[in-house]
Image: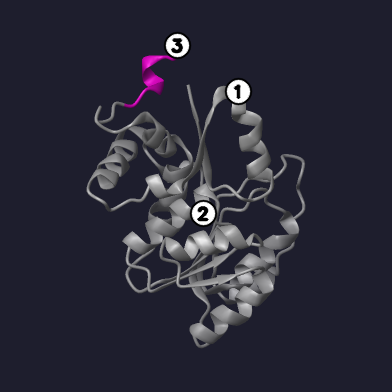
Amino acid sequence: MVHKSSVVKIDPTIPFEVACLVGCGVTTGYGSAVRSGDVRPGDDVCIVGVGGVGTGALQGALNAGARNVFVVDPVEFKRDNALKFGATHAYPDIFSAMAGVAEVTEGRMATKTIVTVGELHGEDIDNYLNITSKGGTCVVTAVANMANLDVKLNLSMLTLMQKRLQGSLFGEANPRRDIPNLARMYQVGQLKLDELITREYTLDQINEGFDLMKKGESIRSVVLF
């Protein structure tokens, strides 16, 4: 049982195993691109980490009109999946991505960078800003350990390059507005949800799902009750 304030009504024709994806991950990622990142037509977007949340950000960036979408992930399975979803370039680490983004954008770098890695580390923040263009925005959706207070950041370049470091909670989404909207987008083919589900499990198979997730071979797994 949950309180009525925690429930959002959706079209009853949408299967629950699909609808559950917009309860958190997809909505967070999508909003990180279109709301927190304010991706505009023609923007070059870099997404660091393309699991379920990152793939939501990828779809948001594409639907908002991004020109190039660069993705960064150490797991080949996730990079390949991102390319199937419409990413234009994929890199295994932030340093190869810097070189690749610089080449494609002729040195301008990514207008918007969206960080959706599994765990945020303070020493990586400067790298994320380095791949972000002058006047660009770096959206941090990934969550760090609460005890992590140390951040590596070139403060001089932050000022001189006039970049923005933007936190994002739930993609700045309004659940009652955005969850039904995303569900309707799915119905008309503007949002891919079925393709996000790597595998479905029964409850007694849940440990298999965790194992697949730890191996990096899952975008989203769904438990069927």
User: Would residue 37 be seen by someone viewing this image from the given angle?
Assistant: no
Q: Position of residue 126 (x, y in %)?
A: 68, 66
Q: Position of residue 119 (x, y in %)?
A: 68, 48
Q: CA distance from mark 3 to mark 1?
A: 22 Å
- Closer to viewer: mark 3 or mark 1: 1
Q: What kind of element bears circle 1?
A: helix
Q: Which one is in front, 211 or 123?
A: 211
Q: Which mark is residue 204?
A: 1
The kind of residue on which mark 1 rests is Asp
Q: Is residue 6 magenta?
A: yes
> Which residue in the protein does label 3 denote?
1
The kind of residue on which mark 2 rests is Gly
Q: CA distance from mark 3 to mark 2?
A: 30 Å
Q: Say which label, 1 or 2, has the lower sequence index.
A: 2
Q: What kind of element bears circle 2?
A: helix
Q: Say which label, 3 or 2, has the lower sequence index.
A: 3
Above or below, 168 relative to 40? above
> Which residue in the protein does label 2 denote?
54
Magenta stretch in the rendered image: 2-8
Q: Position of residue 42 (x, y in %)?
A: 35, 74
Residue 66 as seen in the image, left or right of residue 125: left
